[in-house]
Amino acid sequence: MQPAIRIDNLTKIYKTSGKADPVVALEGISLEARRGQFLSLLGPSGCGKSTLLHAIAGLVSAEGAIAVNGREVKGPGLDRGVVFQDYALFPWRTVLHNVAFGLEIKRIPQEERLAIARKHVAAVGLSGFANRYPSQLSGGMKQRVAIARALAFDPEVLLMDEPFAALDAQTREILQGELLSLWERTGKTVVFVTHSIDEAIFLSQRVAVMTARPGRIKEIVDIALPSPRYGQDVRSTPEFAKLRQTLSRLLAEEVDKAAAEAFALTAKAEMPAPSRSGILSWFASARGAA
């Protein structure tokens, strides 16, 4: 069966200012994700996890090839939904109209798009907040809106860049469970970037561990835990502990390597956080590609 995502020999080099050498962020990445699979990218800071995710989204150009369901990625497209860490909601739009934004880009008639948006607002438990503005929401609520917006226009693939990293531990665990529930109901292919070993184990079917820069795929670990996992105390099982030990060992080796690099070089290679204008540009570009 054709994979949902196929990456072949992907390399990304960032040019630096002055006389500094270019920074190789990714080198020779080859990776596949099956349709309906939940795949997490785990690695030390600066290893290129976000760069790889943004390349799949079409936000970053790189050498090599990326295909989504057999179609070459040449830029943003509405076959991919993206959820960022900083929510990137439009403050002048209500929850309902934030969720409906991608449907506007697809030129769905107003009555239909609002009906679809209401369904997705309800799916993330925010029906009572549909007419609120982002400034009236908690961080967890804002991320629910961002997830609903990404799902509303029915992308084939959902790309998530550390979406829960800024949330408190309790809210983070709640949203992890809600995300798993949504994933199981929708059957979407998900690529999820995280720094958290426990989060990667709890959410994923497979975890791709990346090396310190230049980012390569060091090892892919299958997560053979029962489903559904939400509502169950899977984190206390011996199987979970064994997976945590395996991933901790793999990651610790790369964290040590990353720590040896100069902080200045790390800063130069970091991806800038996307702004709301960046999200607008992404949707506009996706519309052109649709």
Image (cartoon, rainbow, N blue to C red):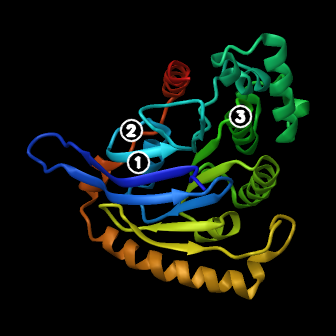
Of the two numbered discs 1 and 3 on the same chain, state the one appearing first in sequence: 1
Residue at image mark 2: 60
Q: Where is residue 196? Give x, y as percent.
A: 58, 66
Q: Are marks 2 and 1 in contact (CB under 8 Å)?
A: yes
* Nearer-the-camera pick, 221 or 131: 221
Q: Quadrant of the N terminus?
A: bottom right
Mark 1 vs mark 3, CA separation in Å: 24 Å
Tell me the SS state at disc 3. loop
Q: Percent position (x, y) of residue 271?
A: 39, 44
Precedes in sequence: disc 2 or disc 1: 1
Amino acid of disc 3: Asp
- Separation (CA) of disc 2 from disc 1: 7 Å
Residue 83 drawn above or below residue 46: above
Instruction: Find the residue positioned furthest to the front.
Output: 1
- Residue drawn where x is 70% and y is 40% of the image: 147
Image point 63% across, 23% down: which residue?
Answer: 90
Query: Which residue is pictured at 85% across the width and 71% down the height?
Result: 232
Amino acid type, callout 1: Thr
Q: Residues within 10 Å of mark 2 (few under 14, many from 20)?
A: some
Under circle 2, the secondary element is loop
The x and y percentages for residue 261 are 26, 65
**Residue 93's image quarter?**
top right
Residue at mark 3: 154
Disc 1 element = helix
| Residue 51 image label | 1
